Image: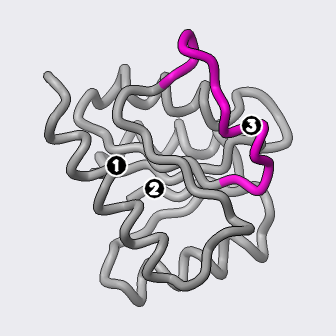
Amino acid sequence: MLYVEDQQAMRVLIGAVLESAGFEVLSAPSAHAALELLEEYDPDVLVTDIELGSRPDGVELARIARQLAPHLGVVFVTSFPRAAQVTARDAIPGAVHVDKTQLASPDDLVVALEQALRARSDQPM
């Protein structure tokens, strides 16, 4: 999995939670760093914040990543509910949205990942 989060503390914390749940995690602090990783790494799922502090944002990153790897599952994790409400033009098919402020336990994030992995297998390649 590739995890993209611009806030270092959150990146380290969620990365550790995902690793303890059994996921192999590569993390990146920006969309640019994530795109560099995608040149050499083929993850099953992209977990990204929507607001990354610079362009491309998480939605743009997911769109680019899906062009490179159509099989990619996508999970958006954000603390900005308005950011999660993407327009139909910006929608990423099968993407799962998670509100950071509503995460009650690490299991909630694992469930979102499992949903994204199931959704990607339902998408035509």
For the residue pair 121 and 53, the one nearer the viewer reads as: 121
Give the foreground label among 3 and 2.
Answer: 3
Q: Which mark is residue 2?
A: 2
Q: Which residue is mark 3?
A: 83
Magenta-colored span: 78-91
Q: Main secondary structure of the magenta part?
A: loop
Q: Is residue 74 magenta?
A: no
Find the residue positioned furthest to the top: 89
In primary-sequence order, the first of circles 3 and 2 is: 2
| Above or below for 11 versus 43 | below
Give how far across and how far down residue 54 sits, in percent.
83, 35
In primary-sequence order, the first of circles 3 and 1 is: 1
Give how far across and how far down residue 67 sits, in percent.
37, 20
Q: Which residue is mark 1?
A: 41
| Above or below for 115 versus 21 | above
- Alpha carbons under labels 3 and 1: distance apart: 27 Å
Q: Quadrant of residue 87?
A: top right
In the image, taking residue 66 as reference, residue 49 lies left or right, namely: right
Q: Amino acid at mark 3?
A: Ala
- Alpha carbons under labels 3 and 2: distance apart: 20 Å
Give the foreground label among 3 and 1.
Answer: 3
Tell me if mark 2 has few (under 14), some (14-19) or many (20+) residues whose alpha carbon lies within 10 angstroms of its own. Answer: many
